[in-house]
Image (tube, helix red, strand yellow):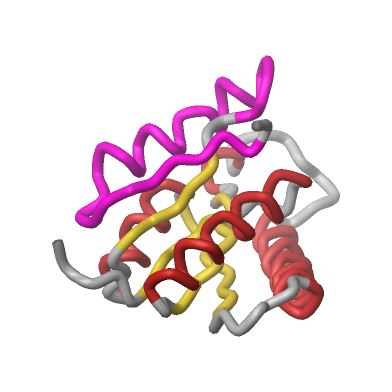
Amino acid sequence: MKDIKKILVPIDFTAHSEKIVESAALVAGKFEALLEVVFVVETLEGYAGFAVPHISLDNLEKDLINRAQNKMEDFINDFPHKNISFNGKVLYGKVAEQIVNHAEAEGCDLIVIGTQTCRGLEKMIFGSVTEKVIKSAACPVLTLNPCI
């Protein structure tokens, strides 16, 4: 088994994100690995045909990215690092695809991702991200249930 030097941790800024990062930090500590924490702003191109007369989708996407970057800075700054090296990054696009592509581009040795915790319509829209990451990642994927 190759050494684990960089761990990618996708988060969604929900209450479960902290639990996932805490668990990933434990793994990172054992391997003296860097944590790469990412959030993906979902592309809105699929909504371009909807009647949204007062909102420019380009402006909305830029606003979402700026807000996500601010949240990421707060998340990283507020997280108790405990001698773990952290990077935080906001990505843009299709969530699972961006996670997998970023892990490969950055040479990540492991992805630590939470299992789905959404219900109803949110589950239909977002519930398959973890499954897609597991099926398409070039590196091992560790899934965690943050509710335990």
| Residue at 48% over, 56% down | 93
113 w.r.t. 75: above or below: above
105 w.r.t. 40: above or below: below
Left or right: 97 with respect to 140? right
The picture quadrant where one finds residue 73 is bottom right
Percent of width and height locating residue 99: 41, 56
134 within the magenta span = yes
| Residue at 57% over, 55% down | 23
- Residue positioned most to the top: 120
8 w.r.t. 138: above or below: below
Percent of width and height locating residue 108: 32, 69
Residue span colored magenta: 117-146
Quadrant where the C terminus sits is top right
The picture quadrant where one finds residue 146 is top right
| Residue at 67% over, 67% down | 65
| Residue at 34% over, 65% down | 103
Q: How many marks?
A: 0
- Residue positioned most to the right: 54
Q: Nearer the viewer, residue 142 or 91?
A: 142
